[in-house]
Amino acid sequence: MTPNADTPTLHASDVNDASYDFAIPIESRRQDYDPMRVVDAEGAWLTLADGRRILDFHSQYMCVGIGHKHPKITAALHRAVDGIDYVSEIMLHESRVTAARLLTQETGDPGHWGGCRFVSSGSEAVEMAILIARTVTQRPRIVVAQASYHGWTSSSAAATSLPHMRNIFHASEPDAYLSVPTDQPPYLAAPTPGPEADEAEVERCLVETERLIRAQGPNQVAAFMFEIYKGAAGFRVPDSYVRGIRELTSRLGVLWIDDEAIAGAGRSGKWWSYQHTGVAPDLLVTAKGIGSSAAPAGAVLISRAISDILNSGVWYSVSTNSGHPLATAAIAATIETVNEEGILSRVTELGARLEARLRDMQDRHATIASISGRGFGWGIDITAPSGERFSPSDRWYVPGLDEAPAFNAAEFVAEECLKRDMLTFTFTANTLTIAPPLSSTADDIEFGLDALAAAFEALDERLSEARGERSGAGI
């Protein structure tokens, strides 16, 4: 599909405006609420109400897996709709059995995984993983890594160590911020190696993580949880750090929860990001791309040692939509399609091309401080040419405490990309994230990268003009 091809034009007036009066907006005040109105999507492209097509170079918050409206997933959902509409989790249906088998046996390491629990989202999957860890260890505490996003529900929000993403509500008064109160404080967060970390920094983080767990008392800590690719923070931790975490958690008798709601389901070029490292977690969180977000779906993969414990007893934790026929149909179709179509190999191949062009952009633009990622998930750190960060607190920005940056460079780049029919997102003023759908073609990737390159040219011009204005004012 090419951008803005000849198709019947759909106008904004064709969309029921009244319905927007009753949908509570997010990330916008009501008076400023003017969302893009999507009327169709296919592959890596969205069609808006005015007929404009834009490249979805972020997979809608990294949710879309193998692409919008993939025919195999669409067909599977049609079959599911014509089949059983609902089955309680205490019963079985064919789609749930198939999805569980494919998830544990056909995504690598079949001897390691003993089972899974289905849920409806990544936040729920984090909650479920924490419940499992606390149940089997009979310990209360969870330790996490800094610069993490784990979700919006009670426990997953407490585990989120990006302060500005921990259920923050920007009230109507200027600069008034409210944090959603919970009955538990944020979990203790260990230092994490950043996008430019060397082995000395990795070792320092491992030492401090072990000290933090020891200070809590290992017999009080159920699990250590972190993301290998931090989708919101926009960087990937080194493989040596992952191996180090596995060694220290095993030695201390603490479980390792690997949150791959974003990093997994093929985004790295393997089914799971941990598979690049040679070690495996005790519990793995997946959501978003595992069902290509064609239906609300998430899951927790459970190691054989832990599943043996759960299978030996009776657990009362039924969830209303766990293993829903539509969700499991989407999961099964996604796994089968990725394996049948060799999508992981294509992500590896095109991911290498994507990285090469990003590094070329870094050489051309002093504003690109670093890039970090793998496959189809990347973060781009942006600074002024002088090296100064636009938001000094960076990923530790606290609304209401720190001043908002005078210029949000990442947001500027994202807006410039959108002007060129490419959609991506940013979660911090210093970092832009890109994450194309896994079925993106080589032409799609080149189109997105061309738009990104032009956006950085526009950023350079904007900053050059600003320097000129300051110089003319005698500053």
Image: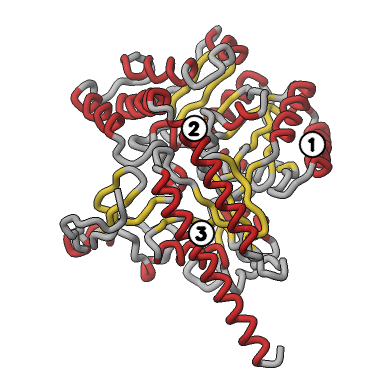
Q: Which mark lies nearer to you, 2 or 3? A: 2
- Towards the viewer: 265 or 13: 265
Q: Amino acid at mark 3?
A: Phe
Badge 3: residue crowd in 10 Å (few <14, some 14–19, many ≥20): some
Report whether residue 182 is seen: no
Q: Which mark lies nearer to you, 2 or 1? A: 2
In-image side of 207 versus 59 (left or right): right
- Which of disc 1 and disc 2 is earlier in sequence? 1
> Residues under labels 2 and 1: Cα distance?
27 Å
Q: Amino acid at mark 2?
A: Gly
For numbered disc 1, what is the local secondary structure? Answer: helix
> Residues under labels 1 and 3: Cα distance?
34 Å
- Towards the viewer: 135 or 210: 210
- Towards the viewer: 354 or 259: 354
Query: Residue at 51% across / 67% down in the picture?
Result: 412
Q: How many marks?
A: 3
Find residue 85 and report its horizontal and vertical position in percent. 24, 25
Which image quadrant for residue 228? top right
Query: Residue at 68% across / 65% down in the picture?
Result: 389
User: Which image quarter is the C terminus in?
Assistant: bottom right
Q: Amino acid at mark 1?
A: Leu
For numbered disc 3, what is the local secondary structure? Answer: strand
Label 1 belongs to which residue?
206
- Which of disc 3 and disc 1 is earlier in sequence? 3
In-image side of 402 versus 108 (left or right): right
- Which of disc 3 and disc 2 is earlier in sequence? 3
Query: Residue at 58% across / 23% down in the picture?
Result: 132
Q: Which of the numbered marks, if any, corresponds to residue 185?
A: none
Label 3 belongs to which residue?
169
Which image quadrant for residue 370? bottom right
